[in-house]
Amino acid sequence: MIPENEFLITEENMYSGALSCRGCGWTLLARYVSSVMGPKTVYVVPACCFSIIAGPNPMNLLKGSVVHTVFAAAAATATGVRRALDRQGKTDANVVVLAGDGGTFDIGLQALSGAAARQENIVFICNNNGAYMNTGVQSSTGTPTGARTTTDPQGKKLPAKNLMGIIEAHNIPYSATASPAFLMDLKSKLEKAREASGFRFLMVDGPCPPGHKHDPDRSIELARLAVETNYFPLFETENGQFNITYTPKTQVPVSEYLKHQGRFANVMQDESNNGLQIIQQQVDQNWKHLSSKQNLN
Amino acid sequence: MLQFETTEMQKTPRADLLTRHTKKVLKGNSAAAIAAKLSKVSLVTAYPITPQTSIIEEITNMIASGEFDAESVNMESEHSVFAALIGASLAGERVFTATSGQGLFYAHEVLHAIAHMRLPVVACNVGRPSFPWNIWADQTDSISQRDTGWVQYYCESSQEVMDTIIQSYRLAEKLKLPVMVVLDAFYMSHTSENVYIPDQKMVNEFCPPREKMDDQIDLEHPKAFGGLVGPDMYDKYNRLYWESIRKVESETIQLGNEFDKTFGRKYAAVEAVNIHEKTEKILVTMASVTTTARQIVNRHPEVGLLKIRLFKPFPKKSVLSVLDNVSGDCAIINIDRNYPGDTEGALMQEMKRALHGTPYNIFGVYTGLGGRDVSSKTIEKIIESDFDKTGIDGVIWMT
């Protein structure tokens, strides 16, 4: 169960002193992203945890330009930056959105869809921690079934939105899911996203100890379990070609992932096991769906 | 004098500069589109909304035909239209867009961000109101953006729209403030009139390319923009904003004088017509109502006209200086083509603020809302009205 994790940071493009919580996935992700994208990158950040992590004005966590923008329109601001840089002949610079699930699934979806449909030459990265964590754990449409949030105190009933399906429907050149526990896979996907041109999208699983209610030192272990249980499958769509990039060797029940997280306490403590069965069913169905897509190739 | 003659006199360049202009019959919206081209705007974002749409249509057509060298992006909403301008302006481009009514309301949040990121954005707003659906002339949309920090000019003619957009880039880039140029729906946006289009060379001379600012995206010297600030920094930034916005009135006058030297047409923060020691009543107007009022004032030697061109920040000094020799008995009648959901219209509110401590009687008229025609008769009726008798707290609702 130990995947290849030799993600060598060949170029450190992040300073120390990130203002994140212990065990935060965002900060690790930003370090990997900035290492692959290089300093000639303009990051566009809507309201999300990273607005804080990146440091207060005039500080800058990243060796790259950072544009903080309004919650609903990261992809639109990135559009403006991209078009301006292109006009100035700076076509080799990367423009990368770093958004949370609220700024991707919910309030940012319209601008995201607009930019994807226009095939804007930008990389949109969503750190999906499954709730509005910066405001203190409120449900988003990225919040999964059963997860307890401050606005779904008994656990969310409905499943998360299938955002990857929505993204795929825009026929963009590259989209993928990735995990901070599968670093070679993450690296390869970041590089593919960097090299492709047109609209590129990455959704990365975001461990969040205060939001998911687990010990900070378990972040990577849980991210790994999310993949091993098929709870957060790793796949990519490259120029229309769908590909599952990691298939677990053994079948691990989803409870192994859920039981370490306080956000699923209601599900795990329910003696009828109804909630757990529903989640396992969702996971199995999703994996079946992805596998059949893979077989179509 | 006929209305036509008055307005023609207003915009005709000085004789020696006539040959450096091309006279054309243009709608207000066309004048705005051509002004963006003349100002060498390099990036335009677009989203349709009546009655602004033909501005972005004309711009994208000029870009497609190659006569206008700029990038245009069709966005998916006005919110994104303005959010994209944040990115493009921060990266150093000279940017433009146009919107109306609901579009401007929808962009409200972004207007604040643009202003307080100190971006020199210029946008044209063709005024129309909100619900119930109405698409006709009304200034409620831009009036309700009073507190966003944008400078606002209200134009009276297609010529003024064109000239003001050109001047706005100078002001915006010098003071690092965004500017909204407002014209009336249909009475201006879709009404054709004579416009003197200046030669590109003259505009280049008056409005050279945007200079590089310290605070813009520079790939070689990366920085963060718009990040969280604590109370101390927030206070400091707002104080700096205040210091800049305080300069707008005098800069507007100075730019108007400079514009006159180059183009032979003079502009200021306000314009006074027929205001003298014996003036008994002064009509205060914005945009196209001014033109109608001009000819009426001609028939009434005792009635003056004060046109407010710069509305935000409100040009208090210019207003007071116009009233310098006017007797304290004079009635100041504000014609408000906006309904801010309050007992008094926006112009009346601002004038009360500007005239605080003076003896003038300040009255207000709500008229022309939702595109209702403000005809010569309406203006006559306003002049004849006894505000003390028929007004409610000095305000008359005129239909």
Image (spheres, helix red, strand yellow):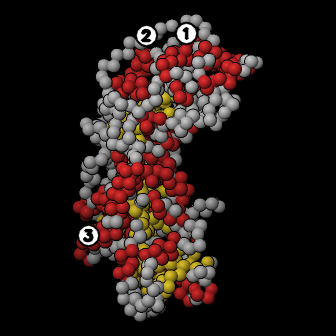
> Which of A71/B356 is in front?
B356
Q: Is the residue B235 above or below the residue B365 in the image?
A: above
> Considering the image in quadrants, where does the C terminus of chain B appear?
bottom right
Residue pointed to by mark 2:
A4
Residue B302 in the image: above or below residue B128: below
Q: CA distance from mark 3 to mark 1?
A: 73 Å
Q: Position of residue B130 (x, y in %)?
A: 59, 60
Residue drawn at the location 27% of the way across and 72% of the way down: B257
Foreground pick, A251 / A78: A251
Residue ID for mark 3: B258
Which residue is most to the top? A250
Looking at the picture, which amino acid does disc 3 mark?
Glu
Q: Are marks 3 and 2 on the same chain?
A: no
Instruction: Report the chain holding disc 1.
Output: A
Q: Is residue B132 among the parts visible in the rendering?
A: yes
Secondary structure found at label 2: loop
Element marked by disc 1:
loop
Chain to which mark 3 belongs: B
Which of the image's four quarters has the N terminus of chain B?
A: bottom left
Does the residue at mark 3 contact the one at mark 2 (Cβ under 8 Å)? no
